[in-house]
Amino acid sequence: MNKVTLRLAHLYPDYLNLYGDRGNVLALKHRSVGRGLGFETVPVGLGEHFDPDDFDLFFIGGGQDSAQKVLIEDFLHDKGPQLKEAILTGLPGLAICGGYQLLGKGYKSSSGEWIEGLGVIDAVTEAGSYRFTGDLFCESPLLREKGLDPMLIGFENHAGRTRLGPGVQPLGKVIKGMGNNGEDQSEGAVVHHLFATYMHGSLLPKNPDLTDTLIELAYYRRYPDGEKLPDLDKSWEERARRERLSKLKN
Ligand code: GLN
């Protein structure tokens, strides 16, 4: 079989890229290539054409309220409708913080302005009076069910408090930090193969099991009968995890 190349759409990289979000794309590439796949990243910016059928997965990072406002028209009208359709038919993706809020129903910013969202996640966000900043660790039942390490390790910095609708599955349960709203211990959301989270940091370099999950979802969506992908060493990632997890004891 010819080498399979996964194609990733990186949405609005010039506007949504906080606290090392781009590292998520690098981690996806690193582990895809290490597992025998090709990997191509295509930046998709404001005003640029976007057809999700051209891609195997997508990434959208976090940003300030002002950045969310700049791109919202383009997102809701030019890219969002086809992205929503693709997510609902299983396109895998990762959305961080501001990107997560844009995929929800909307966000009432600190200035009181309502920023409409795509509504693919039944979630509403409202800015609180202070920011949630610091380590954010959560346990994901989804990873546990797959026999993977359930602990996700990241960093949060957001004003938004997100409430999930009744049927929405959180990505995980908060172990340290605030997560979606600081009250119900929920963190992030999962809709089909979309993983949305408040975890910056970068997230994926420290969470190789989630990285591999995204890669496998993308690969088997395109090649349902594809050969099993080889395993890849993750000892460096494990070292980074151990260092961060030592904070749990402090
Ligand atoms: N503007 C959003 C908030 O403060 C998102 C911030 C971010 O992406 N880090 O809630």
Image: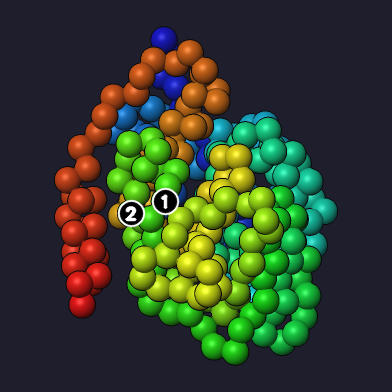
- Label 2: element kind: strand
Q: Is residue 84 visible?
A: yes
Q: Which mark is residue 151?
A: 2
Three-letter amino acid code of the residue under disc 1: Ser
Label located before the other in sequence (1 or 2) = 1
State the residue in front, 144 or 80: 144
- Label 1: element kind: loop
For the rendered model, the colour scheme is rainbow
Contact (Cβ within 8 Å) of mark 1 with mark 2: yes
Please give left or right for residue 18 compared with residue 189 in the image: left
Tell me residue 164's x, y (percent). 64, 61
- Look at 51% across and 18% down and name the residue there: 223
Question: Disc 1 beta carbon < 8 A from ligand 1?
Answer: no
State the residue in front, 174 or 224: 174
Q: Is residue 154 above or below residue 210?
A: below
- Look at 53% across and 74% down and name the residue there: 183
Q: Is residue 10 visible?
A: no
| Residue of label 1 | 140
Tell me residue 59's x, y (percent). 54, 49
- Residue found at the very far top of the displayed protein: 1
State the residue in front, 101 or 222: 101
